[in-house]
């Protein structure tokens, strides 16, 4: 499915003197162990006029010290320190709001510190956006796979994510379909200023996706492309990390934080995922045929989405495992949200009722 997307070409189409100014906005909370290494690819970018706004969101470790030291060493880094979270704001969204308020660039790039950018990617992405008269460009990154099962799980997640996003219509200005990618959301600053801004997304756990929705609803032109070779993110180190990391938001778009939907959705979702594979062990021919057809379809999808011959083979063989892991992750997130009556994100608890009231990203 990702192969049908346009991709950012390796050629640089704009000369350096024609490139607009760029503000990169990154938030960090208690990331002292990885922050410095993560910011390195941002610091080493081949771009003439840019600033890196790094927001320290109430960190309790040495994150703030590291940001200040790097700011003294690299003048393009602009530090912001937040020590208080106002009511009715998610920590990350509040931090992003502070970053935008200080940004001077003609374009804004929302990204994460753990994303590795090719040294010329910004030039090419800006050139692509301007050439195609875009106000918002989201790029799909590549995700290194620490194992074959993890690889199959990422394929399953990408398939489900892109299927619900209606990607065929994202680049169509007449469609309501929109998307946002946390690894790379490039936005024309003048367009962002004409939207409600992060105030509108203040309690949205899918803030990256919400940026795309907000811009599309306000009449601005989006674009979606792939840059899997030039944009790499170590999303999670392993499957347990992924399962824990997604418990804050994987269930949000589909359940709308409704108590009833949080109860019924994992049952329906699990049944949809489990039924075809359970049918494979049935002695009844109709059930077996049904299961085999579903297995074949998911396998072919995984095969098609792979990058190399070896990756294709493993993705094909393990695709059922990937879908089962995603199903478990979704069910677990729903159950935890019910038990907690909310979510815990970056060490802060957010009540379910408030998340439901202010939610913007819904499927």
Image (tube, rainbow, N blue to C red):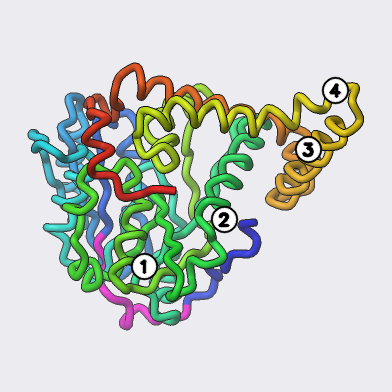
Compute the Cα span from label 2 to label 3.
29 Å
Q: Mark 1 and mark 4 in contact (Cβ < 8 Å)?
A: no
Name the residue that disc number 1 marks: 136
- At numbered mark 4, what does the secondary structure look like: helix, strand or loop? loop
In the picture, which quadrant includes the N terminus? bottom right
Which is more N-terminal, label 1 or label 4?
A: 1
Which one is in front, 327 or 279?
Answer: 279
Compute the Cα span from label 3 to label 1.
37 Å
Residue that appears at 20% across and 53% down: 200
- At numbered mark 2, what does the secondary structure look like: helix, strand or loop? loop
Which is more N-terminal, label 3 or label 2?
A: 2
Residue 313 position (above or below residue 241): below
Crowd band around label 2 with a 10 angstrom C-alpha radius: few (<14), some (14–19), many (20+) = some
Residue that appears at 48% across and 73% down: 172
Compute the Cα span from label 4 to label 3.
14 Å
Q: How many marks?
A: 4
Which is more N-terminal, label 3 or label 4?
A: 4
- At numbered mark 3, what does the secondary structure look like: helix, strand or loop? helix
Question: Can you tell which mark lies on residue 282?
Answer: 4
- Residue span colored magenta: 13-23
Crowd band around label 3 with a 10 angstrom C-alpha radius: few (<14), some (14–19), many (20+) = some
Name the residue that disc number 2 marks: 229
Residue 346 position (above or below residue 297): above
Q: Could one spot residue 284 in this view of the protein?
A: yes
In the image, 323: left or right of 219?
right
Within the magenta stretch, is there residue 135?
Answer: no
Residue 217 spot, x, y in % from top left:
32, 66
Residue that appears at 60% across and 28% down: 270
Question: Can you tell which mark lies on residue 295?
Answer: 3
Residue that appears at 29% across and 30% down: 345
Crowd band around label 1 with a 10 angstrom C-alpha radius: few (<14), some (14–19), many (20+) = many
């Amino acid at each position: 499915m990702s192969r049908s997307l346009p991709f950012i070409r390796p050629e640089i189409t704009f000369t350096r003197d024609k490139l607009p100014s760029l503000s990169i906005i990154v938030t960090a909370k208690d990331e002292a162990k990885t922050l410095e290494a993560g910011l390195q690819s941002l610091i080493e970018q081949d771009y003439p006029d840019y600033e890196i706004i790094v927001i320290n969101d109430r960190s309790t470790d040495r994150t703030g010290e590291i940001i200040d030291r790097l700011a003294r060493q690299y003048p393009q880094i602009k530090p912001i320190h937040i020590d208080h979270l106002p009511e009715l704001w998610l920590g990350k969204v509040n931090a992003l709001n502070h970053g935008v308020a200080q940004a001077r660039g003609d374009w804004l790039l929302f990204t994460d510190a753990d994303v590795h950018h090719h040294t010329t990617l910004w030039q090419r992405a800006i050139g692509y956006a301007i050439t195609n008269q875009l106000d918002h460009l989201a790029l799909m990154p590549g995700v290194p796979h620490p194992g074959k099962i993890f690889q199959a799980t990422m394929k399953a997640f990408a398939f489900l994510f892109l299927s619900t996003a209606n990607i065929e219509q994202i680049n169509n200005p007449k469609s309501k379909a929109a998307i946002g990618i946390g690894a790379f959301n490039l936005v024309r600053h003048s367009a962002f200023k004409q939207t409600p801004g992060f105030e509108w997304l203040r309690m949205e756990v899918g803030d990256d996706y919400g940026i795309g929705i907000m811009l599309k609803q306000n009449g601005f032109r989006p674009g979606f492309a792939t840059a899997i070779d030039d944009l790499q993110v170590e999303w999670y180190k392993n499957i347990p990390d992924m399962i824990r990391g997604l418990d804050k938001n994987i269930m949000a778009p589909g359940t709308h934080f409704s108590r009833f939907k949080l109860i019924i959705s994992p049952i329906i979702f699990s049944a949809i995922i489990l039924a075809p594979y359970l049918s494979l062990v049935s002695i009844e021919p109709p059930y077996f045929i049904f299961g085999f057809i579903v297995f074949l379809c998911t396998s072919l999808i995984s095969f098609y989405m792979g990058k190399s011959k070896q990756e294709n083979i493993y993705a094909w063989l393990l695709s059922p495992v990937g879908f089962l892991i995603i199903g478990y992750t979704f069910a677990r997130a729903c159950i935890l949200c019910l038990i907690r009556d909310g979510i815990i994100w970056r060490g802060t608890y957010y009540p379910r009722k408030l998340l439901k009231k202010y939610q913007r990203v819904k499927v």
